[in-house]
Image (cartoon, helix red, strand yellow):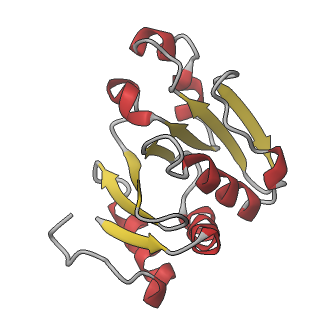
Amino acid sequence: MLIFDALNESDTARLGAALAETLSDGTTLALCGTLGAGKTRLVQAIAEAAGIDRRNVVSPTFVLVQEYHGRRTIYHLDAYRLRNDDEFRALGPEEYFEGDGLVLVEWADRVAPCLPPERIEIRIAVTGAESRRFEIRAVGARHVATVERLRHRLGGECPSPLPPGEG
């Protein structure tokens, strides 16, 4: 597991840029956190680093799926308003999971059984008015190296990584 403490939105933007540069095509990010934790803000930061105007990136709570095209394609899904796994499956997420874009799922904990077994999970906790703690972990073996590359990319900007073997 990798822990990244963001003191402000600029740190969140730095994390988003590092994710956009590190994640391979076809990666699913499962974003979890309370209302206002910063899930959509992180998606905006990833999108901006992928060449997408962040002003075009909005929470897909009512639309459920948004597609953004820049240097990379991003599929942005939101499970907040869904009542059950069947409603999520009705969106056809397998098509996105099997594609070449990045798949970012907000409120992923609500549909965890529907997510690919190989993914990266990011839990976001509010730690202050502008500060957030991002806990980033690989689920499955495929993305362990990705999380390590992300740790390396963030370098000294990541003050709270767990020692190897503790995540």
* Residue 98 visible within the image: no
Does 105 sit left or right of 133 as displayed? right
**Can you tell which quarter of the image residue 64 is in?**
top right
**Can you tell which quarter of the image residue 56 is in?**
top right
Residue in the image at 76% along x and 44% along y:
57
Residue in the image at 43% along x and 35% along y:
108
Q: Position of residue 120 (x, y in %)?
A: 40, 51
Query: Height in image: 144 above or below 106?
Result: below
In the image, 155 versus 116, the foreground residue is 155
In the image, 25 versus 64, the foreground residue is 64
Does 16 sit left or right of 112 as displayed? right
**Can you tell which quarter of the image residue 96 is in?**
top right
Query: Height in image: 144 above or below 152?
Result: above
* Residue 161 visible within the image: yes
Indicate the quadrant containing the N terminus: top left, top right, bottom left or bottom right.
bottom left
Q: Position of residue 34 (x, y in %)?
A: 43, 42
Q: Position of residue 19 (x, y in %)?
A: 56, 64
Residue in the image at 34% along x and 69% along y:
2
Q: Residue furthest left?
A: 165
Indicate the quadrant containing the C terminus: top left, top right, bottom left or bottom right.
bottom left
Q: Position of residue 41 (x, y in %)?
A: 63, 53
